């Protein structure tokens, strides 16, 4: 019977913190699938050997997290343009011939979370309705910026502590993406339709994110992709200024959907029960 189990998992190092097994196990049970999803610890030197083991064991694919998101690209036989643009693969699909196809579902997760939140706002806010400010220029920022480019946001300002890294993101769409000095974030925040924190600032155990939202347009939406805590100081400040907010947990949940669909053939939904379970 065991060989009929559809197997998938998440690889990383360390992997114990990953919420992905909770999410996928919930959907596997919900849809009554004969499937499994494991958290697999793989130290960087063993990546290639262990990935080949997973293929030999009949895995349909796996998610990829820190520190393997770039290294896995070299092991994939094919990487889609989205993952190439973002510069990271977070989902691998093992094809029938054993070859590895790499993609990035963080862009989907980021945009779907925003769309779903916007439905509840009750006014005509859209992602593409004006300029955006992205705080940070790491891996998550690249996914967010790509999502905003895909949605047709007219101007995307990127502010990062290390300015050169913000500058690097301009090549993703030179006419749309503009690096701005980290010290200018308060001023830029007052000119945009959407602000997102993609730095690790504000996470439990990290320094707070310092920004002044008092000059924001009243229709501006503030999003934090940090989800521990769910209501970060940034989101609390936004609420205090009567701005609409979007928490980060939805991005984590939505990014898991296309991977689940690719491996198990069912497109699962994000529900409040799942959100409560993961939080
Ligand atoms: P990363 O590649 O390491 O990037 C970290 C970013 O934070 C960089 O822009 C870095 O600036 C900035 N930063 C760190 N410490 C700072 C400080 N003291 N002052 C100013 N900026 C600072 O990490 P990542 O993968 O992009 O992840 C970033 C955050 O997003 C994490 O908290 C992660 O948990 C969260 N995340 C959430 C989701 C979700 O599904 N909700 C998905 C992915 C990531 P420098 O370039 O100057 O170092």
Image (cartoon, grey):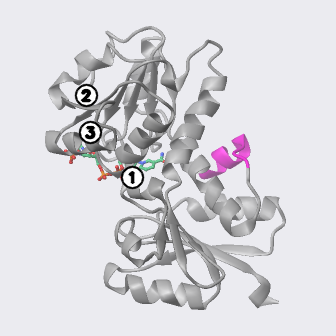
User: Residue 66, position in %: x, y?
Assistant: 38, 64
**Residue 13 visible at all:** no
Q: Tag 1: Cα neighbours inside 10 Å, few (<14), some, or many (≥20)?
A: many
Magenta-highlighted residues? 269-278
Q: Compare residues 212 and 47 and report the one nearer the observer.
A: 47
Residue picked out by circle 2:
210
Residue picked out by circle 3:
170
Query: Where is 241 relative to 85, above or below?
Result: above
| Contact between labelled residues 3 and 2, with CB atoms less than 8 Å apart | no
Magenta includes 275? yes
Q: Tag 3: Cα neighbours inside 10 Å, few (<14), some, or many (≥20)?
A: some
Q: Is residue 188 left or right of residue 53?
A: left
Residue picked out by circle 1:
86
Q: Compare residues 161 and 237 and report the one nearer the observer.
A: 161
Query: Where is 275 relative to 42, above or below?
Result: above
Q: Secondary structure at mark 3?
A: helix
Magenta span: predominant SS is helix
Q: Secondary structure at mark 1?
A: helix
Q: Tag 2: Cα neighbours inside 10 Å, few (<14), some, or many (≥20)?
A: few
Label 1 vs label 3: CA separation?
12 Å
Magenta includes 44? no
**Mark drawn on residue 189:** none
User: Residue 27, position in %: x, y?
Assistant: 73, 59
Residue at the spot 32% in from the left edge and 45% down from the top edge: 200
Quarter of the rendering containing residue 125: top right
Label 2 vs label 1: CA separation?
27 Å
């Amino acid at each position: 019977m065991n060989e009929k189990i559809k197997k998938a998992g998440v690889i990383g190092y360390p992997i114990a913190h990953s919420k992905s097994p909770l999410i996928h196990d919930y959907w596997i049970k919900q849809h009554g699938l004969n499937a499994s999803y494991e958290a697999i610890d793989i130290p960087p030197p063993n990546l290639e050997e262990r990935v080949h083991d997973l293929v030999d064991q009949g895995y349909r694919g796996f998610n990829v997290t820190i520190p393997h998101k770039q290294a896995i690209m070299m092991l994939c036989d094919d990487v889609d343009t989205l993952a190439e643009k973002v510069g990271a693969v977070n989902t691998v699909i093992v094809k029938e011939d054993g070859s590895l196809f790499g993609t990035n579902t963080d862009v989907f997760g980021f945009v779907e979370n925003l769309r779903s939140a916007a439905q509840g706002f009750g006014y005509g806010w859209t992602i593409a309705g004006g300029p955006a400010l992205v705080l940070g220029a790491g891996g998550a920022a690249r996914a967010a910026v790509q999502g905003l480019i895909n949605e047709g946001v007219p101007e995307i300002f990127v502010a990062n502590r290390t300015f050169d890294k913000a500058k690097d993101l301009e090549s993703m769409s030179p006419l749309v993406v503009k690096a701005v000095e980290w010290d200018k974030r308060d001023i830029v925040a007052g000119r945009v339709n959407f602000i997102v924190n993609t730095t690790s600032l504000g996470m439990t155990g990290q320094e707070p994110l310092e920004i002044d939202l008092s000059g924001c347009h009243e229709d501006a939406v503030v999003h934090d992709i940090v989800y521990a805590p769910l209501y970060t100081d940034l989101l609390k400040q936004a609420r205090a200024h009567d701005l609409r907010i979007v928490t980060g947990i939805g991005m984590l949940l939505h990014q898991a959907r296309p991977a689940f669909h690719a491996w198990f053939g069912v497109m699962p939904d994000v529900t409040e029960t799942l959100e409560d379970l993961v939080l």
